[in-house]
Image (spheres, coloured by chain):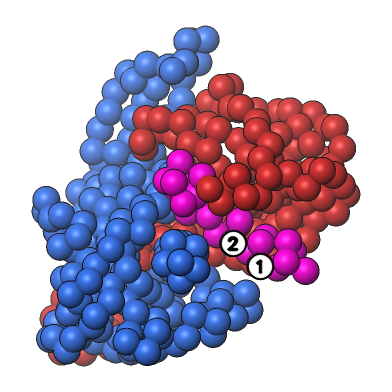
Chain colours: A blue, B red
C-alpha cells in the first residue's frame, strides 16, 4: 500500500449501513479521503421450483422510486450466518421454505465505495411456509419464470438489478448446465 | 405508493457520493426512514483485443483493503455522457483508445440503498493511447484473458466484482454468441 490512514471516523450510523470517512496520506505526502458505506452484507437466493422455474420478486426500490424485478434477497441480521439469512429471506419474501440450499458464490456489489458482500445460494425442494414482510415490502409480488425468459428480460433491459444478473449467471453455469 | 415523504435531508456531501436520509410515513400512520447513497453513476467497459481477449484491471479497493480483478470502469464526471465516460476511463486505466464502442446494457449495483447506475459498453478496435491514472490508482495492473478463463475465474470465486460479472454476461450473450 502506498498510503497511511491519518484519521478514520464514522460520520453516520444508519438502519441499513454506516458511513465511514477516512483521511489518508500517500507516501508522496499528498492527502486524500476515502468514503466507505459500511454494510453488513446479505444473501441472495435463486429459488427453483419442482418444474424448474425460478422465483423472482417485484418490489418498490426507494432510490429509483420504482418497482424492480429481482431475485429474493436481504441483509444479514446482527451476526447471522449467510445460509440462515438465505432461508429466512426466502420464506419471508416468497412464502417458501427450502430443504435443499446450496452455495453458488459471492459478489461485491460496489467495491469502489461499499463493503457489501452478497452470498448467493440456490434453493430447491420448495415447500409452503409463511410470508413475513416488513411494512415497506407490502406491495411485493412473486413471479415464476423459466430460465430462458429471465435471460430474455436481462438482455432486453427489463431486469437491471446487478445481484440478480450475477445470481442467474452462477446458477446457469454451476447448476443448470450440469 | 403507500407512504409520504415527511422530510428529506442531505446529511453528507462527499467526493464520490452524497448521503440522503428521508423520513417517511406509511398510510398506516407508522414512520420509517430511508437512507440513500446518491451516486452519479458510471461506465463499465468490456475491452476486446483484436485476438479476442478481454482486458481487465487489478486494483486496490479501499473498502476491502485488497486488490480486486475487475473490468475497467469509472464514475461519470459532472454531466458527462456515459459513452464519453467509457472512452475516457478505458484510456485512463488501460492505455487504449477504441474506435468501436457499443452499448451492452445497464445495471443498478445496489438498488436497495444506492442510486448508482452503471452503463456497460463493449470496446473493440483498440489502439494505443495514454494512461492517466489518479494517485490512488498507481498500482493498477492490466491483464488480458480469453473469455473462458474469465468465466473460470468467476466460477472459482477469483472474480467477485458484481459489475464485472454482469459485463461478462452481457458481452457473452449479446456479442460473443452472435
Of B161 and A111, nearer the camera is: B161
* Residue at 33 percent of width and 44 percent of height: A115
Residue beneath label 1, please?
B173
Q: Which residue lies furthest to the front in this view?
A: A178
Q: Is the magenta stretch mostly helix, strand or loop?
A: helix
Query: Any magenta on residue B176?
Result: yes
C-alpha distance separating marks 2 and 1: 6 Å
Q: Is residue A156 visible?
A: yes
Q: Position of residue B62 (x, y in %)?
A: 40, 33
Q: Is residue B125 left or right of residue A8?
A: right
Percent coordinates x, y for residue B105 in the rendering:
64, 67
Q: Is residue A155 above or below residue B93?
A: below
Which residue is painted at 53% across and 38% down in the image? B69
Above or below for B169 versus B88: below
Outermost residue toward the top? A28
Please state the extent of the stretch shown in magenta in the rendering: B153-178
Who is closer to the viewer here, A65 or A53? A53
Kindly indicate whether the residue at mark 1 contacts the one at mark 2 (C-beta within 8 angstroms): yes
Q: Is residue A53 found inside the magenta-colored segment of the image?
A: no
Disc 2 is placed on an element classified as helix
Q: Which label sits on residue B169?
A: 2
Dot 1 falls on a residue whose secondary structure is helix
Q: How crowded is mark 1: few (under 14 residues within 10 Å), some or many (20 or more)?
A: some
Q: Which chain carries label 2?
A: B
Q: In this view of the protein, can residue B115 be seen by the observer?
A: no
The residue lying toward the viewer, choosing from A102 and A21, is A102
User: Is B67 positioned to the left or the right of B28 in the image?
Assistant: right
Amino acid at each position: 500500500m502506498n498510503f497511511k490512514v491519518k484519521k478514520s471516523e464514522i460520520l453516520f450510523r444508519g438502519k441499513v449501513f454506516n458511513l465511514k470517512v477516512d483521511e489518508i496520506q500517500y507516501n508522496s505526502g499528498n492527502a486524500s479521503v476515502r468514503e466507505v458505506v459500511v454494510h453488513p452484507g446479505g444473501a441472495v437466493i435463486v429459488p427453483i421450483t419442482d418444474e424448474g422455474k425460478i422465483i423472482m420478486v417485484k418490489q418498490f426500490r426507494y432510490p429509483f422510486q420504482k418497482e424492480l424485478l429481482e431475485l429474493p434477497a436481504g441483509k444479514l441480521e446482527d451476526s447471522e450466518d449467510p445460509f440462515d439469512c438465505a432461508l429466512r429471506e426466502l420464506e419471508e419474501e416468497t412464502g417458501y421454505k427450502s430443504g435443499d440450499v446450496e452455495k453458488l458464490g459471492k459478489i461485491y456489489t460496489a467495491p469502489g465505495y461499499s463493503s457489501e458482500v452478497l452470498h448467493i445460494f440456490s434453493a430447491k425442494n420448495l415447500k409452503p411456509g409463511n410470508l413475513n414482510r416488513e411494512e415497506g415490502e407490502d406491495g411485493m409480488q412473486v413471479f415464476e419464470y423459466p430460465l430462458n425468459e429471465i435471460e430474455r428480460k436481462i438482455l432486453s433491459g427489463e431486469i437491471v438489478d446487478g445481484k440478480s444478473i450475477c445470481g442467474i449467471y452462477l446458477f446457469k453455469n454451476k447448476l443448470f448446465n450440469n
